[in-house]
Every structure is written in C-alpha cells, then in structure tokens.
Amino acid sequence: MAKRKVDDERMKEPESAESSSEESSSEDDTNMLDVEFEWFDPQPDHDFHGLKTLLRQLFDVDAQSSDLSALTDLILAQPLLGSTVKVEGNETDPYAFLTVLNLHEHKDKPVIQQLTNYIQAQSKRNTDISQLDALLNKSSDARVGLVLTERLINIPSEVVPPMYNMLLEEISWAIEEKEPYDFTHYMIFSKTYREVASALGEEDAPKQKKQKNVGKKGSSETFYFHPEDEVLQRHAAAFGSFDYLKEAVGSDSKRTFQELGVKPEGHIILIEAAKFEGAVKALQEYFNQT
C-alpha cells in the first residue's frame, strides 16, 4: 500500500483567559492562537503509550474489559492504515487517532475475541443494536470493520473529516492490492452521556432557581462527546447507546452543568459499506458549514 503524505492544517484555538486579561479590558474579548495540526500514519516506535491512553479514554470504565496493550499493538501493526493527529512533530504523542480493524481477519486473536464478546453482550441489552449479535457471530459471512477513534477533550472536531477521508483513500488502496479491507459493514465504537442528578449534599450543591427533571438514572436525552456521531448515524443501519458493564462512579467529577453530573455510556453506529462514503461526505459538508 502506498504511503500517504503528511497533511496539515492551521486552526484557531482560544487562548487562556489568564493570558488575555492583561491585553484586553473587555471580559468578552478572547485572543486566539494558531495551532498547526499534522496528520501522520501510526508510528510503532512512538505512539504506543499515546494510543493506549486514548483507547482507555474511549472505553471509559469498561477499559479493563479488553487488553488495551494488545489492541494498541494491533493498531500499530497496520501503520499504513489510519491516522494520528499531532501538533509538535511525528515523534510526539498523538492528540487524536482513527483506525479500522478487520474483526473477521483477526477473529482468532484474544483481544478481538474479548471485544467481540463485549459488543455482542451489549447488543443483547439494547434492542436498537440487537442485530450486531448475529452480525458478529462466527458463522456470519459479514466482514465488519471496527472503527476506533478518540481525541483529547480540547481538540476541535474539525480534525475528524480529514481522518475519515484519508481512511477511505487508504482502504481503496488496500483493496486494490488485495489486502483484507473489503468490508460489508463499518461499526464505529464511540461514547455518549446523559445528565444525572448531582450526588452532592444540599450544603455543597449550588443554589438553583429551577431544578431540571433529571433522576439518578439520568435524563432521556442523549448528548455526544463526538459531535460527528450525530451526522454518521443518519446513514446508519443501526445505532444505540448502552450502559457500561462496570458501574460508573464519580459523575460529579464529570459535570457539564453546575447542577448536574454526567453519566457516560458506550455508543455504537453500524453503517453498511455501500453507505459509508456518503456518510463521510456528509461529515465533511457538516463541518464546512459550522
């Protein structure tokens, strides 16, 4: 497979309020910093720890359900497929990544068996994604590509479309060279969250004029850590969120609103291969408009 060139793009990032306060008398003024993001192929010599950290963030409290070291090694074993995003050169830790793994090709590897069993177990708990159980069955003829992607919380979503575009290009090259990336389905593993009532005591909780109707189990509204998921699932054959197998604790440490905590959940989007390119194109159009 031919190696793609490194791509880069400059994006505006807000400077911290502390550093801008001396330069502006207005509280509404925000200085912007130029940040140059660069897209690289995964680097086996440099990316192990950074990728493993991002995988741990992606799987959240269920990270121990899979051997993340083995999963990282598997990602790095296909260095010409997938991308990392960095800001200080190729030898630094990635701030974001995207890759795809062939679940059928690697079905005998213990880490893929762990992941497959995990996803099948979750599909049995949520009817929205129940078809994944049969799709991932050993007797199935489906060739499923598991898309894994994550980024640090302060990395803008605009880095995502180039990674998906590069992935499409690389898969096309791989198929031309008879490599095993001719998928029937793409399964994107992601995460969402719901708002939950704060566990703080009355004396610690902030004063509220109006209390939202949110219980301990969370609200019915789903929020997205990855905004692109809302676009991708418009093209999906199935999608849904699910509770982690391990009980999440400390939702107050993940607050997004003063009066509410956050309950993270796993999320899966299944897209048929024939519709994947259209989903990626819609992703590009969406971020061009925002």
Image: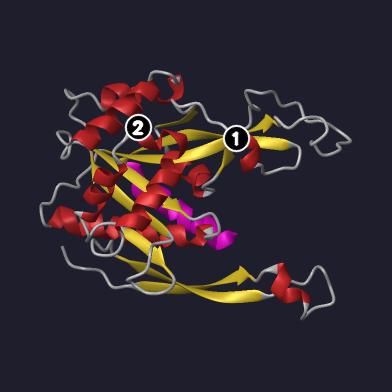
Regarding residue 241, the answer to whether it shows in the image is yes
* Residue 231, numbered label: none
Seen in the image, is 83 located left or right of residue 44?
A: right
Q: Provide the residue span drawn in magenta.
A: 273-290
Hey, which residue is sitting farthest right in the picture?
Answer: 209
- The spot of residue 243 in percent (x, y) is 49, 26
**Residue at (18% x, 25% y) in the render:** 138
Residue type indicated by callout 2: Ser
Q: Is residue 25 above or below residue 192?
A: below
Task: Give the mark nearest the N terminus, 2 or 1.
Answer: 2
Q: Which of marks 2 and 1 is in front?
A: 1
* Residue 65, numbered label: 2
Residue type indicated by callout 1: Gly
- In the picture, the quarter occupied by the N terminus is bottom left
The residue labelled by disc 1 is 250
SS at circle 1 = loop
**Residue at (86% x, 36% y) in the render:** 208
- The spot of residue 113 in percent (x, y) is 23, 31
Taking the magenta stretch, the answer to whether it contains residue 124 is no
Regarding residue 143, the answer to whether it shows in the image is no
Comparing 240 with 44, the one in front is 44
Q: In which quarter of the image is residue 212?
A: top right
Taking the magenta stretch, the answer to whether it contains residue 281 is yes
Q: Is residue 268 above or below residue 164?
A: above
Q: Distance between the residues labelled 2 and 1?
A: 20 Å
